[in-house]
Amino acid sequence: MTPRHTAETAARLRKEETPLRKTELAISNVLRGGVLLSIAVILAGIVCFYVMKSSGGAHFSYPDTLSALWRGLAQGRPLAIVMLGLVILLATPVIRVAVSIAAFAVEGDRTYVGITGIVLLLLLFSIFGVGQWLGHPGSVAVHDDSLRFFLIVLSGSLFAGLTGALVGLGGGVFIVPLLTLGFHVPFMLAVGASIVSVIATSSGAAAAYVRDRMTNLRIGMFLEIATAAGAIVGAALTAYLDVQVLFVVFGAVLLVSVLPLVTRMGEEFPAHVENHKWAERLRLPSVYPDRRAGADIPYKVAHIGAGFSMMCVAGLLSGLLGIGSGVFKVLAMDTFMRLPMKVSTTTSNFMIGVTAAASAGIFFQRGDIDPMIAAPVALGVLAGATLGAKLLTRLSNKHIRMVFAPVIVLVALNMLARGLGWL
């Protein structure tokens, strides 16, 4: 395609998507508002906790049901305030989906009202159906409430959020090893904190990516059906499956998956891509602004079925391991659907929050989200994700792929080592 034809295609696609701009801005504002509100509430609770602890008046158990949360708030318990901030963060992707339905309805886009409505139903079923079934009432003792633990986890989470925002991961692949190996946190509490980190990365980075039109909103909404359904099944199966075996399988698949990336390491934009028939019907082909190229870059979308199937697997692994499975999402969009790497990573960031939210209610109601672990994770990851979102726009697709491939190898080796009992 000649430069002139490329510019004409980009202009046509941009004009066709003009009505979508209001939806993008509404979603960006919801994500940004949810993040800022959750940060404010979490910080207020943390300050109250350490002030009361120094005077001997802090309570060292946390609520794991909504009714227990309201009782704790009524009693002025700091950990209930911290948990409220975390619940606001966990609810942000759900609210984002609900706002998306309203925005698509205003635009008269019935197709995406239906698609997004299915995603919302899956999320609500997870929280109020599966979550209620697997959860248990009561309060649980905190693992570690020392200020030293809080600050170290905060620092490590900042790195996780930065890396996650750049390569489309949720940060959980770093959070779980940090907590389990570095601080001997029980595995399920580490997974619960990881779920929070995934939502924090998604909400923090996606607010900027959606606003800047780097994310393909329609692809994200469509594929969220697969990831949300998979995440519900995965979270429900955590009590019945051998996690060690899953680590080995996950690590092996990742090592094999990195090969296509290596063969296309120097590729800046996908070539010889033809739209899948469903891509046209669902209006998935789009355009994104590339700051380095100084132009709007149009792109096509291939192999919808393969991408959707991979998203089911990604959701399943997210629910089982609490890692966000952004690796599989990026691989599915880059390798199968042949999207530009920037679009793959930003759309993955957009999606992982909903994937994690589908299982977050289950982890919350099982008592697996310890606020004194999840709070520093959330704050650190949000700071890192914001920084990463600003950095990504200045990198090329080739540079992002060069960062992404080694990260996959490290994640795969980590998973294999944990599954084989070497860590």
Image (tube, rainbow, N blue to C red):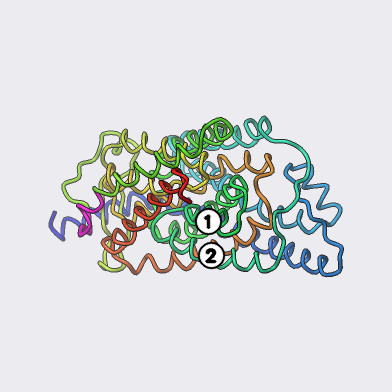
Segment colored magenta: 260-269
The question of residue 267 being in magenta is answered with: yes
Image quadrant where residue 183 sits = bottom right
Q: Nearer the viewer, residue 237 or 222?
A: 237
- The x, y position of residue 28, in whole percent, is 51, 56
In the displayed structure image, the side of residue 81 where residue 330 appears, left or right: left
Image quadrant holding the N terminus, namely: bottom left
Compute the Cα span from label 2 to label 1: 8 Å
- The label on residue 158 is none
Residue lying at 42% horizontally and 40% vertically, measured from the top left: 314
Q: Secondary structure at mark 1?
A: helix
Looking at the rendered structure, the kind of residue marked 2 is Gly
Left or right: 186 in relation to 67:
left
Give the image location of residue 298, x and y in percent: 26, 53
* Cβ atoms at labels 2 and 1 below 8 Å apart: yes
Q: Which mark is residue 175?
A: 1
Is 411 in the magenta?
Answer: no
Disc 1 marks a residue whose amino acid type is Ile
Residue 157 % position (x, y): 54, 62
Question: Which residue is identified by label 2?
Answer: 156
